[in-house]
Image (tube, grey):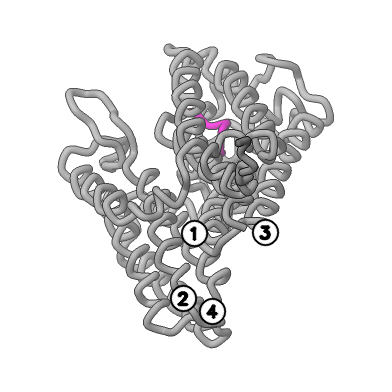
């Protein structure tokens, strides 16, 4: 007798869950394209900026970009829920590395920002701590079942961020520590914060800033702020760097001087030109047109990430993307403002353009996590 049974069709949502990579065609290719283009621009600019240095940093940065691409692909393939569920061990591991760096850390000017063994820098634990904090906060805040967070929930979230902030400040690395603030603030705002709680948080931040100025900052760090307020007070000392940076940006004019033709970078007038002030090199060589094009790529990256957050299928995805986008956006805004003298000089690099292994990996990891959220937006709808 011929069987009349029919195979039960697999719902699309379950099919996607079984084969998560089958949805690659539905990824936000705008964010992926912006990531790849920014990384390519970064490699070219780092090569130009380090052309007159004893070491050409292009091969090293190319290795970090290659490693970042592999890391991004791995994180896209992994369900972000898996990482969020294991966020506590990841967070505790990051804290352990931050404690370890205080003992065996290396860095310029007496700082201890990098793990170092035998003269080799193994990485900056602060970058891992940012990702770990974002994952743990996404897990914790997603459990809130009210429109507005309770004060206890806000305090717990603040404590989660306070631990790595305190350890990073102890290095001391105030620039990296400051990047935890937009991370926590954005995730709390998305989770729901009452206006009075927000006002209390702003007041506490202002009080903490005053205490840091009075007791936590070294003389050279205070001098950077003084120089920002009065740029001509020390043109050959603390004000030299931003003065040369503004000259480089202004001399690029509309279309720039051409690749590797910038006088400020090629004649070594501009310090830190392959790291924190790489945008000044770009502006001098490619002018307003080139700088605007790169800022447009950053805008495309941020807008694409925000669209992913808005169409995420759960609170965990929304919170995670919001936290990562906030770090990325503040890095871009502060660094570009710093090179033209709008804000005090702080060691805050430019995503995908500044030379640096740990920071480059963190940027690719953030892109991978955001795309992982996007890839799984159709699962279990």
Mark pair 1, 3: CA separation: 17 Å
Magenta stretch, residue numbers:
351-355
Mark pair 4, 3: CA separation: 19 Å
Q: Position of residue 364 (x, y in %)?
A: 51, 35
Q: Earlier in the sequence, mark 1 or mark 3?
A: 1
Q: Quadrant of residue 375?
A: top right
* Residue located beneath label 1 in the image: 183
Mark pair 3, 2: CA separation: 19 Å
SS for dot 3: helix
Which quadrant: the N terminus? top right
Q: Position of residue 179 (x, y in %)?
A: 47, 54
Query: Eyeballing the image, is 270 above or below 310?
Result: above
Which numbered mark, 2 or 1, is in the foreground of this view? 2
Mark pair 2, 1: CA separation: 18 Å
Q: Which mark is residue 144?
A: 2
Q: Main secondary structure of the magenta part?
A: loop
Q: Callout 1: 10 Å neighbours few (<14), some, many (20+)?
A: many
Q: Residue at the spot x=22%, y=38% of the render?
A: 105
Q: Residue furthest front?
A: 1
Q: Residue at the spot x=31%, y=41% of the render?
A: 113
Front-lying residue, 238 or 207: 207
Q: Indicate whether residue 35 is drawn in magenta.
A: no
Which numbered mark, 2 or 4, is in the foreground of this view? 2
SS for dot 4: loop
* Residue located beneath label 3 in the image: 310
Front-lying residue, 365 or 294: 365
Q: Earlier in the sequence, mark 1 or mark 4?
A: 1
Q: Is residue 337 visible?
A: no
Relative horizontal placement of residue 192, taking residue 251 as reference (left or right): left
């Amino acid at each position: 007798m011929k069987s009349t049974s029919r195979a039960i069709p697999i719902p699309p949502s379950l099919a996607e869950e079984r084969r998560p990579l089958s949805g690659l065609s539905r990824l936000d290719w705008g964010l992926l394209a912006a990531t790849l283009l920014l990384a390519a621009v970064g490699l070219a600019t780092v090569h130009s900026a380090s052309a007159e240095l004893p070491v050409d940093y292009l091969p090293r940065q190319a290795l970090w970009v290659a490693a970042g691409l592999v890391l991004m692909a791995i994180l896209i393939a992994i369900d972000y829920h898996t990482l969020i569920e294991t966020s506590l061990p990841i967070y505790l591991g990051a804290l352990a590395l931050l404690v370890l760096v205080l003992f065996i850390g290396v860095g310029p000017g007496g700082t201890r920002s990098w793990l170092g063994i035998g003269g080799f820098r193994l990485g900056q634990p602060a970058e891992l701590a940012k990702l770990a904090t974002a994952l743990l906060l996404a897990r914790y805040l997603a459990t809130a079942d009210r429109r507005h967070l309770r004060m206890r929930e806000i305090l717990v979230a603040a404590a989660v961020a306070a631990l790595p902030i305190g350890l990073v400040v102890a290095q001391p690395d105030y620039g990296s520590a400051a990047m935890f603030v937009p991370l926590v603030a954005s995730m709390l705002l998305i989770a729901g914060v009452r206006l009075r709680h927000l006002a209390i948080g702003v007041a506490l931040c202002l009080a903490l800033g005053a205490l840091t100025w009075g007791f936590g900052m070294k003389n050279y760090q205070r001098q950077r702020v003084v120089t920002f307020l009065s740029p001509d007070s020390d043109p050959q000392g603390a004000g030299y760097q931003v003065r040369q940076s503004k000259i480089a940006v202004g001399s690029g004019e509309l279309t720039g001087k051409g690749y590797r033709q910038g006088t400020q970078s090629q004649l070594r007038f501009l310090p830190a030109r392959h790291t924190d002030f790489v945008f000044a090199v770009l502006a001098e060589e490619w002018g307003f047109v080139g700088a605007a094009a790169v800022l447009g790529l950053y805008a495309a990256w941020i807008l694409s990430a925000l669209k992913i957050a808005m169409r995420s299928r759960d609170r965990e995805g929304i919170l995670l993307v919001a936290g990562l986008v906030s770090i990325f956006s503040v890095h871009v805004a502060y660094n570009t403002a710093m090179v033209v003298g709008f804000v005090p000089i702080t060691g805050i690099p430019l995503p995908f353009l500044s030379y640096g292994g740990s920071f480059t990996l963190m940027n690719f990891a953030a892109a991978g996590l955001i795309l992982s959220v996007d890839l799984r937006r159709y699962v279990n709808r």
